[in-house]
């Protein structure tokens, strides 16, 4: 059982090195805040915004989908036999995760694990035929490494995502199947890395498609372990984009359009993001404009948001300008393997990072709309219209920033691991409102976790928001228990999600494990041995983690979750 009472990150584990890092991190954050204009620092300190990864300000970027084929080191494996090549390539993957995990602030991803590595192994002269056991052992070892290694900053696991499912040749299909199969059979306490299955018409979405069997395999694994999650390549937002260029980084980051011509996620990432506290602004508007109509209050909310979004954009620009002028030697692995879509060695940091995104995020749309209208947005047509209109307004503003500053700005539907609780704690010192009583704010535009809405209604309600959140978004369905015998039901919900506009879909259910006898299920006392030594695995904000490590806000949210 974890003992992390003051944890800011559910992926952290207490260690000597980690404790020392945390001490230094706090000092670094204070130094950075002190170096910023007072207005900007106050916005963060007072809880109007949250500057994510503050300790990395001006030193590195957030996340990246590797262009793994660009400069793959084939020469490292010259002269080796097939077995040593297979083991060596998977050891190389671990190596770059470890190196890049300390070279950037956030998530790492392969956009097409199956296709890319099938091509790499073929170029190395290796076939999976005759070496299936070696591949299975190597992929299993990689999964275990991703799950167990908390060496980043001495305490944190690596935020790794494997996107898969589109490769239709036999080598790609074998790699995709083996990745899912090894994860499925690795045991309940293996809940990482994040695996994303790409659903695409003509490839795997329907019976008769060449990879439909892989989709069925993915659904079986999801029904047991909540992974894979699903990138819905045929949704409204992404259907015009080559699905091979789509990728999930971190827990939901999306990078597609690029004003500099490198469309898609491969070799690109998010530079930085800042989240805005929508309920705080709504509380201020409600206090000042009590007698006005709902429509008038929403217009006031837009004005107040712009007052915060303006300096937020300036902070993003300041951070970008400092990052592109950072010490070039901070990126040795990027220089060596050219994971970005531009070669840092010739294009420099600015020529490389200009292809990244600068994101304004938001949390607590549901609470903000209820504060101003008195209605849950998914229960009232007018409130729903106001919610959609407000998110579209925010997106229009970030689009205007792209035009004005000639950089890739985007709107991010923020997950809220730390800020869901941090913002409410600050706001409770200023306001007394029912929206604060539950001690957390709802992620992004999500329907509240205790809504009890039927699954199809939740997807339909949230689906229309996805197209505005071009910086990333996800919708979850909360289930009462593992749907082990109902994978068809999961597939039906995925279809509803696609038709509703959902871009990225996950299925949540409580998963408990008795540490004494190994029994899995949902229980407070083990039904087999009567033990109370229970590990509870839940999804925190995109990643699965152990409940004991959740932040205060996320623990409060978990208690309120109700099945859809």
Image (cartoon, rainbow, N blue to C red):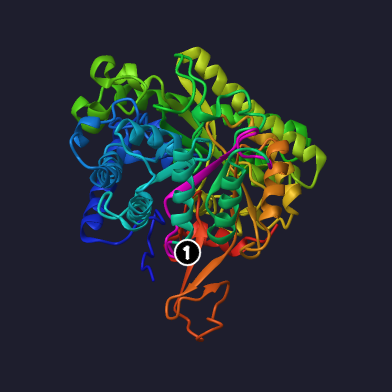
Mark 1, residue position? 547
Q: Residue 26's spot in the image, x, y percent? A: 29, 48
Residue 413 in view of the camera: yes
Q: Quadrant of the N terminus?
A: bottom left
Q: Residue 244's spot in the image, x, y percent? A: 51, 29
Q: Residue 164's spot in the image, x, y percent? A: 49, 40
Q: Is residue 363 above or below residue 520?
A: above
Label 1 secondary element:
helix
Residue at 41% over, 57% down: 10
Region rendered in magenta: 186-207
What is the crowding at mark 1: few (fewer than 14 residues within 10 Å), some, or many (at least 20)?
A: many
Residue at 43% over, 28% down: 266
Find residue 85 and report its image quarter: top left
| Total residue callouts | 1
Q: Residue 537's spot in the image, x, y percent? A: 49, 63
Nearest to the observer: residue 479 or residue 550: 479
Answer whether residue 194 is magenta in the image.
Answer: yes
Q: Quadrant of the C terminus?
A: bottom right
Answer whether residue 544 is magenta in the image.
Answer: no
Q: Main secondary structure of the magenta part?
A: loop
Nearest to the observer: residue 106 or residue 149: 149
Nearest to the observer: residue 21 or residue 120: 120
Nearest to the observer: residue 71 or residue 350: 71
Q: Left of 290 or right of it: where is 410?
A: left
């Amino acid at each position: 059982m974890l003992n992390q009472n003051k944890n800011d990150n559910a992926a952290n584990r207490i260690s000597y090195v980690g404790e020392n890092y945390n001490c230094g991190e706090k000092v670094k954050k204070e130094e950075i805040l002190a170096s910023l204009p007072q207005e900007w620092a106050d916005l963060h300190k007072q809880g109007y915004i949250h500057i994510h990864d503050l300790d990395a300000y001006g030193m590195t970027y957030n996340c990246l989908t590797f262009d793994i084929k660009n400069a793959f080191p084939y020469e490292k494996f010259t002269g080796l036999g097939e077995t040593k090549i297979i083991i060596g390539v998977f050891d190389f993957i671990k190596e770059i995760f470890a190196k890049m995990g300390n070279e950037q602030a956030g998530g790492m991803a392969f956009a097409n694990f199956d296709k890319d590595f099938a091509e790499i192994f073929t170029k190395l002269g290796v076939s999976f035929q005759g070496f299936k056991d070696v591949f299975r052992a190597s992929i299993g070892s990689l999964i275990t490494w991703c799950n167990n290694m908390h060496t980043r900053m001495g305490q944190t696991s690596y935020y790794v995502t494997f996107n898969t499912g589109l490769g239709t040749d036999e080598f790609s299909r074998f790699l995709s199947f083996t990745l899912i199969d090894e994860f499925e059979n690795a045991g309940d306490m293996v809940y990482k890395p994040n695996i994303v299955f790409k659903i695409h018409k003509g490839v795997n979405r329907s019976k008769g498609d060449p990879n439909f069997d892989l989709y069925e395999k993915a659904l079986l694994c999801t029904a047991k372990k909540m992974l894979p999650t699903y990138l819905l390549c045929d949704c409204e937002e992404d259907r015009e984009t080559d699905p091979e260029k789509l990728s999930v980084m971190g827990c939901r980051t999306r990078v597609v359009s690029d004003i500099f011509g490198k469309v898609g996620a491969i070799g690109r990432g998010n530079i930085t993001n800042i989240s805005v506290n929508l309920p705080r602004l709504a509380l201020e508007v409600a206090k000042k404009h009590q007698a006005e109509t709902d429509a008038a209050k929403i217009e006031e909310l837009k004005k107040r948001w712009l007052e915060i979004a303006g300096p937020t954009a300036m902070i993003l620009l300041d951070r970008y300008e400092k990052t592109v002028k950072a010490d070039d030697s901070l990126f040795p692995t990027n220089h060596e393997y050219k994971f970005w879509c531009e070669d840092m060695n010739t294009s420099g940091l600015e020529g490389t990072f200009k292809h990244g995104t600068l994101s304004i995020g938001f949390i607590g749309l549901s609470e903000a709309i209820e504060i101003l209208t008195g209605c849950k947005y998914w229960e009232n047509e007018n409130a729903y219209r106001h919610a959609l209109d407000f998110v579209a307004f925010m997106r229009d503003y970030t689009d205007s920033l792209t035009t004005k500053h000639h950089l890739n700005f985007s709107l991010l539907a923020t997950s809220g691991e730390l800020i869901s609780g941090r913002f409410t704690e600050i706001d409770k010192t200023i306001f007394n409102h029912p929206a604060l009583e539950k001690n957390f704010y709802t992620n992004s535009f999500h329907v509240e976790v205790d809504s009890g809405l039927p699954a199809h209604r939740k997807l339909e309600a949230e689906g229309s928001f996805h197209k505005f959140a071009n910086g990333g978004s996800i919708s979850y369905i909360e289930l009462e228990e593992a749907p082990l015998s109902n994978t068809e039901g999961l597939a039906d919900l995925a279809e509803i999600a696609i038709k509703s506009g959902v871009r990225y879909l996950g299925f949540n259910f409580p998963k408990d494990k008795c540490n004494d006898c190994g029994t899995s299920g949902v229980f407070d006392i083990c039904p087999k041995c009567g033990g109370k030594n229970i590990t509870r695995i839940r999804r925190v904000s995109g990643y699965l983690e152990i409940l004991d490590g959740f932040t205060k806000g996320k623990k409060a949210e978990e208690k309120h979750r109700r099945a859809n």
